[in-house]
Image (spheres, grey):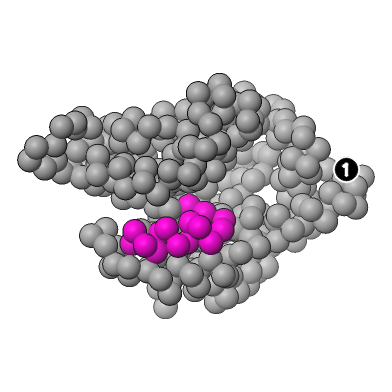
Amino acid sequence: MTPTPLSILELVRITEQTDARQAIHNARDLATHAERWGYHRVWVAEHHNIPGIGSSATSLVIGFIAEGTRTIRVGAGGIMLPNHAPYIIAEQFGTLERLYPGRIDLGLGRAPGTDQRTLRALRRTAQAAESFPQDVVELQAFLAATVPGQGIEAVPAAGTDVPLWILGSSRFGAMLAAELGLPYAFASHFAPQLLDEALDIYRSRFQPSAQLDRPYAMVGVNVIAADTDDQARYLATSQQMSFADIFRGARGLSRPPVDDIENYWSPMEKQQVAAMLSCSVVGSPDTVHEGLQALVARTGADELIIVSDIYDHGARLRSHQIIAEVGGILPADAKAAG
């Protein structure tokens, strides 16, 4: 049986021991390993005003990762389109496609990815999200070949046909992706509640398009892999603390793991974090193998995109190597190299 393609959502985490420069270099280092380990794509997401995430200038980070790799697909998971004019995004990603042909993806989200004060700094309003469907179509047109009489051209983007994805965590994104005939990525790594319903909507309403003739769904999942279950649970506390901080309104730098997470969060925070991270697999190679198989069987995912939010870069590399091994994507030469 052909293994399910595995990809990586790179958070570009800034930790208590690394600055933004190191976080971005770590992202590229992971991508070079991921390419050798058989991963299909690496995506980074647009966030603003979050001290612990270094991917705010998303297209620049994508270019830096693409420059350090040769074959793996690199893209946005995603660009928050309400923050931008579609024309500008077409120019940016069309340029990336010209530089790294056949390797660039453009995932699009409707949420602003930030708070109201930062929206004002971006010179945008919350109402900009209301035109998201029209903006997607406009962006798609700027990336397509020019037509006679076209008054404005996105140079050098026109004709690149950069593949678009719709990202979502609700019914809306599923319906839009189906209507436009685009691949769909569900953000179950932090908002898993509507995963099954959204996938059902997407598949049942899908309309073939020039880009895609059948539904293609990618599912986000948190995976913390280590040599033992106990070690993986220990490493996972960094992500658990980050999510607890969200509910405290105190987003900061990524923290090193702790021996007893119960001393960090309240019972209410524990419950809230557990709900957000319910689509997670944490454990040894055997545990991860079983968990990923169960998720694919449940969702019918065409592809999984992995978040392995681990504080130490070396441990994060090891996690992704284990995931590739148990997921059946690790090439024979990579196994031999260790």
Residue visible at 81% across and 38% down?
Answer: 248
Residue visible at 90% across and 52% down?
Answer: 267
Residue 188, by quadrant, is bottom right
213 up-or-down from 109: above or below: below
Q: Nearer the viewer, residue 279 or 85?
A: 85
Q: Position of residue 259 (x, y in %)?
A: 86, 46
Q: Position of residue 23 (x, y in %)?
A: 57, 30
Which residue type carries mark 1? Tyr
Instruction: Return the residue at label 1.
Output: 264
Q: Position of residue 274 (x, y in %)?
A: 77, 57
Q: Nearer the viewer, residue 102 or 273?
A: 273
Residue 202, by quadrant, is bottom left
In the image, residue 327 lies in the stretch drawn in magenta: no
Q: Kindly report the secondary structure that dominates the magenta region of the rendered protein.
A: helix
- Residue 327 appears anywhere in the view: yes
The residue range painted magenta reads: 167-181
Q: Position of residue 34 (x, y in %)?
A: 46, 48
* Left or right of 224 in this view: 245: right
8 up-or-down from 94: above or below: below
Asked which secondary structure carries label 1, the reply is loop
